Image (tube, rainbow, N blue to C red):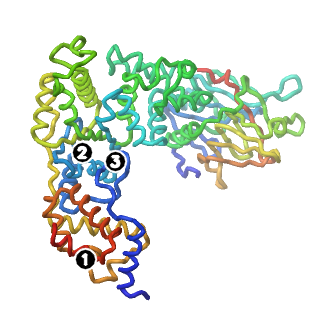
Amino acid sequence: MLLYENKKAKLLNILKFGINPFKKFVSTGEIKEDLEFTSSRNELVNTLSETIKTNNNFILPIIGGVGTGKTHLYWILRSGLYRHNTVYISLETGSKRCFYNMYSNYIETLELEPLRNTINHLCNEWGALERKYGFFHVVNIDKVRNNALHKLSRHFKDNEQVALRDVINGITTHQLDPYKRVDAERWLLGELMDVREIARLNLQNDLRKNKNAYVMLKLLIENARKGTVIFIDDFEKLIAMLKPPEDEEEEKIFDPSWLYGSESSPDHVEARKVLKKIMKLLSIKGMKVVITLKSMDALEEIKNIIRDIDENFVQSFLDPLFLLKLSEDDILEFYIKNMEHFLTSINLYDFYDEIPEKYFPLNEIVLKRIYKNTDGNPREIIKMLIKIFNDIIFSEEELENVLFKYERSL
Amino acid sequence: MMDESISNVLFDSVKDILVEGEFKGSIITKCLDPEDSIIFSDNMLISNTEGIIIKDGLKVGYNLDNNKKKAFSIKQDFQWEDFRTIVEYCIRIPDEIMQTYSEGQFSDAFPFTLNLLHTAGLYLNDFKYGVNHLDFFTGEILKNPVTLILHGILIADRVVIKEDGDPVFYDCLIVGRDEHEILKVGYEPITNVEDVLLKYIIILGTEELKL
């Protein structure tokens, strides 16, 4: 059996390979976060979950400063809301071809089998399971398409009818025409297809066409077994896009005012378009939208812009929830959770049960100093932890000396 | 997976069950004629005065034509006042079983399934007029088989003929009598039947099933 000193030495040796337990200080919508929130944030998560479960067609703002864990909150919601598909949308990448991007992200979250189930359910509702003589299922694809069109056309505007026909044809081809099923599935997954492939499926456009993507989204979301939460991160990017450019003195070869007028700009027009699309998205039955913002001022500014477009729409906004900074106890809990996660990944499951030091290789004094120095901002805390662990890993000095340095300098 | 309930039996000449009324759903009528015919319908009216009335039913069986037994399927209305000598039983398949049966048909795409245009006999167990095309279709998938077994009826979405000549039925509805002669209904995703137990297999043609 190893003595506890040897366990500590073993961990330090592993760290010296260059493995830092703290790596990521910026959360993204693409890379999954395994760590849970600290327990002081449970109340916020519970309130948020309850709001999502009990309400429909709302926009719920989450206010939190830079680095407070707004994007991390997405992963917490995604893993906690079992009966919802929680879809991450970033306005950084998603403002162009807005509905197509939303659709792609939705499909990525939904996954293939639930998508097949939903469109199977839709086809059955359109009469695909009609039985001749009470028993024999005979595919009459045109009759199913007509049924679908008859049922759905009144729920879409006149300029969306072509898209609706495309969507109905795509779904019924996938379900009822086994010879074209593979191509139809590629179309349903939002793959880019050439004109010949689209024509073979008897369609006009693929889902890059925003109207097609919107109609697909509406049908899938309204008929999916699970509810849908759209999580739009950094919503105040829209405000930045709506503001006029700062360096107006700069000489330009092409002056956008020739096209957009002196009051507007390409970004301005795009931002208003995105906003209108998000407002349209909220008209989908059962849609729930969570947005993150850095301040209350930004929220008010967004509401004012929306008032200009549609006065009544502001009523869809629920009272904001606030993502606060971590407390002093939180940093200790956060450190322990992260270290335990790291130790599990290197097969040292019971490390802290076998040594007396609770926060090894750091100590409580250093952690509290970090807290004071960073004012409880999670991102700054992680950055500081990365720096200290890098010192432990790469410094020639003894651990005690490294810690002593930080106990005094921080 | 046989259904224990007998409430779906509308008429049974063996157990002397008769439920009067008008019925909708998936109804199988087994006839007592020499053709061993089966009638599929989505409606039925039973009354002691008018007898049994079926509108737009599909009758399936083998009949003798030019000294040969040929499979047939014919769409027609039926009305029998003295039905007790003509019909063995009428049974309605429960909706939940039909739901499972329908879902089984869509559970996967079989693009290489053979659909026959006209109804044809695949197998008939008859000493004098026997039909056996099982070898010809070995390894193929045939759509819409209707099968009469010694003590029951089997309707499947598709049938595959194994190398040894025995058919394997997929997505099957089975109607039959247990050891107490009670009628039961069941669903099986796959059923193996030895050819010695078969009375006949008929493959329904798509022409007869056109909407």
Residues tagged by mark 3 and mark 2 found on one chain of the structure: yes
Instruction: Judge left or right: residue B93 versus residue A357.
Output: right
Determine the CA span between mark 1 and mark 3: 51 Å
The foreground one among A283 and A60 is A60
Specify few, some or many for label 2: CA neighbours under 10 Å numbering under 14, 14-19, or 20 or more.
many
Number of numbered tags placed on the structure image: 3
The foreground one among A55 and B29 is A55
Residue A116, relative to residue A272: is it above or below? below
User: Which numbered tag is attached to residue A134?
Assistant: none
The foreground one among B41 and B134 is B134
Tag 3 and tag 2, C-beta contact below 8 Å: no
Residue A226 in sight from this viewpoint: yes
Specify few, some or many for label 3: CA neighbours under 10 Å numbering under 14, 14-19, or 20 or more.
few
Q: Where is residue A25 in the image (x, y as percent from the top left)?
A: 28, 54
Q: Which amino acid does label 2 sit on?
A: Ile
Mark 3 or mark 2, earlier in chain: 2
Q: Quadrant of residue A57?
A: top left
Q: What residue type is labelled 3?
A: Arg
Instruction: Judge left or right: residue B139 versus residue B176.
Output: right
Mark 1 or mark 2, earlier in chain: 2
Specify few, some or many for label 1: CA neighbours under 10 Å numbering under 14, 14-19, or 20 or more.
few
| Residue occupied by mark 3 | A83
Q: Residue at x 34, y 51 (%)?
A: A82
Q: From the image, state whether disc 1 or disc 2 is nearer to you.
A: 1
Q: Which residue is drawn at 40% across and 43% down?
A: A109
Q: Where is residue A182 in the image (x, y as percent from the top left)?
A: 58, 32
Determine the CA span between mark 1 and mark 2: 50 Å
Q: Mark 3 lies on which chain?
A: A
Residue B52 in sight from this viewpoint: no
Q: In which quarter of the image is the C terminus of chain A?
A: bottom left
| Residue occupied by mark 1 | A401
